[in-house]
Amino acid sequence: MAELTWGDKHALGFRGIDDEHEELFEAVRGIESAMARSAEPAAIGALLDKLVAATGTHFASEESTMRGAKYPGLALHAAEHQRLMEKLGAFAARHGQGGVAMNQHTVTFLRDWLLHHIETDDSRLGAWLKEHGSD
């Protein structure tokens, strides 16, 4: 699988959102790297906790931006955020209890979800913000 790399093709053109997206890329890449080197479960758990925290912070920030800009897609976008936070919480809880939460399937899900969400939902948000003069 190709390395998950942040690049201009993922940028929405809004520094705060883009910086947070890059942080999410780094968090997922850190988990992928730890899994590839068969890191201890505690190390993977710490990386997963970091991803959960960064994702929660990003979603709160992004939703605040959407509210401030009166983005018409806020409800659907926020619902998608909530679904991912529930999944991340479940992964973290299972991992913390010694269950098999982090495996290649889970990492692939995280990678695919991040890419898909930025390329679709967040791309629509970015285009709307640019069109309506929000920064």
Image (cartoon, rainbow, N blue to C red):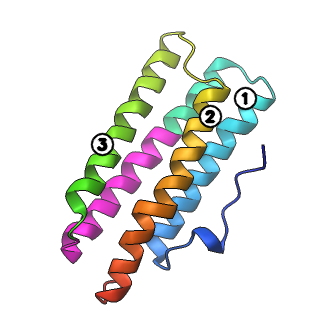
Type of residue at label 3?
A: Gln
Q: Position of residue 134 (x, y in %)?
A: 31, 84
Tell me if mark 3 has few (under 14), some (14-19) or many (20+) residues whose alpha carbon lies within 10 angstroms of its own. Answer: some
Q: CA distance from mark 3 to mark 2?
A: 19 Å
Q: Of helix, strand and loop, which mostly describes the magenta segment?
A: helix
Could you say whether the residue bearing mark 2 is in a helix, strand or loop? helix
> Which of disc 2 and disc 3 is earlier in sequence?
3
Type of residue at label 2?
A: Val
Q: Position of residue 60 (x, y in %)?
A: 31, 55
In the figure, residue 88 lies in which quadrant? top left
- In the image, which residues are magenta? 51-71
Query: Which residue does the numbered mark 1 point to in the structure image?
Result: 35
Could you say whether the residue bearing mark 1 is in a helix, strand or loop? helix
Is label 1 in contact with label 2 (beta carbons under 8 Å)?
A: yes
Which label was assigned to residue 107? 2
Image quadrant occupied by the N terminus: top right
